[in-house]
C-alpha cells in the first residue's frame, strides 16, 4: 500500500527554537498534503492543506507565521514550527493524497514535539 | 457547521464478543466517509471508504456500513490485536481537489483475551 514517511518521529528542543518536520510520499506523487495536530486522547485537527507549487491554505485559528508550510515537490512537504514555545508541544501528523479522487489520504507515523 | 461524532468513547470487549461502533455526521456536502485505525504513537491506518448510503465494505473481522446520517463499524469475534482507536472521518469540499477530512473523536477499543 501507499507509504508516507515522516521525520523526525520525536524531537525535544528548547523554547524559542524553530523545528522542521518532513513528510514524504514514498511510492506515489502527492499533489496535496495535509498537516494535522493531535492532543492526547483527542482526535486529529486539520491545520493546513498544502498543494505542490502553491501557498498552503490554513484552517481558521492556525497562525501562518508560526507554522510555515512548504510543498516544493510532489513527494515532499515540510512544516516548520517557528520560535516554538511549550504550548506548541503536540503530536503532528501529515498525510498525503494522490491526484486520484478515489484514493484515501495516507498518513505518516507522526512527530512527537516537546518544547522545554 | 460540519460535525462528526463517534460513540462510545471507549469500549471494552472480551475476545469473541461482537459489537458495533457508531459514527454520526452532519456535513454540508459529503464526498466520502472513511474509517481509520490508530495505534498509540502512530498515524492513522486506512481501513475503509464509503461513498453512498447502503454501501458496505468488509475486511477480515471488520464491516463498515453507511446511511445518510451515520456509519457503523461492526467488529465480529474480535481478537486482542484489534485493540486500537478507531477514527471516523468525513470528506468535505475544501481548498484542494481532494477536499479535506473532518475527524470524529474516536472510539478506543480494548479487547481482553
Image: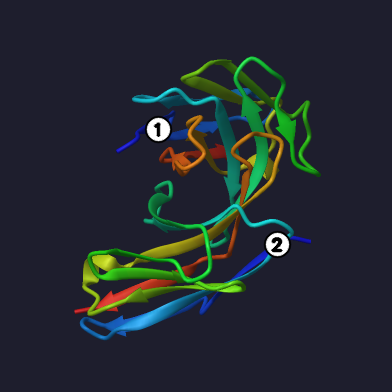
**From the viewer's perspective, is residue A74 above or below residue A5?**
above
| Horizontal relation, residue A21 to residue A50: left or right | left
Q: Are marks 1 and 2 on the same chain?
A: no
- Circle 2 crowding by C-alpha within 10 Å: few under 14, some 14–19, many from 20: some
Residue B108: which quarter of the image?
Answer: bottom left
Give the residue drawn at x 27%, y 78%.
B76
Observer-nearest of A112 and B6: B6
Give the residue drawn at x 66%, y 34%.
B96
| Horizontal relation, residue B36 to residue A65: left or right | left
* Chain name for mark 2: B
Residue A44 in the image, given as x and y percentages of width and height? 58, 52
Per the rendering, the mark at residue B27 is: 2
Residue A73 in the image, given as x and y percentages of width and height? 53, 14
Look at the numbered disc 2 and give the secondary structure of its residue.
loop
Give the residue drawn at x 38%, y 72%.
B109
Observer-nearest of A80 and B48: B48
Residue B92 in the image, given as x and y percentages of width and height? 66, 51
* Chain name for mark 1: A
Label 1 sits on residue: A4
Observer-nearest of A47 and B32: B32
**From the viewer's perspective, is residue B48 above or below residue A107?**
below
Amino acid at each position: 500500500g501507499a507509504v508516507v514517511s515522516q521525520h523526525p518521529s520525536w524531537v525535544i528542543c528548547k523554547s524559542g527554537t524553530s523545528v522542521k518536520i518532513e513528510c514524504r510520499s514514498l511510492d506515489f506523487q502527492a499533489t496535496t498534503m495535509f498537516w494535522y495536530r493531535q492532543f492526547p486522547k483527542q482526535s486529529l485537527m486539520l491545520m493546513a492543506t498544502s498543494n505542490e507549487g502553491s501557498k498552503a491554505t490554513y484552517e481558521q485559528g492556525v497562525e501562518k507565521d508560526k507554522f510555515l508550510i512548504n510543498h516544493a515537490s510532489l513527494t515532499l512537504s515540510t512544516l516548520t514550527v517557528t520560535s516554538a514555545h511549550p504550548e506548541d508541544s503536540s503530536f503532528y501528523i501529515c498525510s498525503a493524497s494522490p491526484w486520484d479522487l478515489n484514493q484515501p489520504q495516507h498518513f505518516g507515523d507522526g512527530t512527537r514535539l516537546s518544547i522545554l | 457547521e460540519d460535525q462528526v461524532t463517534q460513540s462510545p468513547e471507549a469500549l471494552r470487549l472480551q475476545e469473541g464478543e461482537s459489537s458495533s461502533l457508531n459514527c454520526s455526521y452532519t456535513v454540508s456536502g459529503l464526498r466520502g466517509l472513511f474509517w481509520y485505525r490508530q495505534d498509540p504513537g502512530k498515524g492513522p491506518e486506512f481501513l475503509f471508504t464509503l461513498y453512498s448510503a447502503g454501501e458496505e465494505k468488509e475486511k477480515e473481522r471488520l464491516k463498515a456500513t453507511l446511511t445518510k446520517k451515520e456509519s457503523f463499524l461492526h467488529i465480529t469475534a474480535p481478537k486482542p490485536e484489534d485493540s486500537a482507536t478507531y477514527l471516523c472521518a468525513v470528506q468535505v469540499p475544501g481548498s484542494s481537489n481532494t477536499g479535506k477530512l473532518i475527524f470524529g473523536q474516536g472510539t478506543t477499543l480494548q479487547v481482553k483475551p
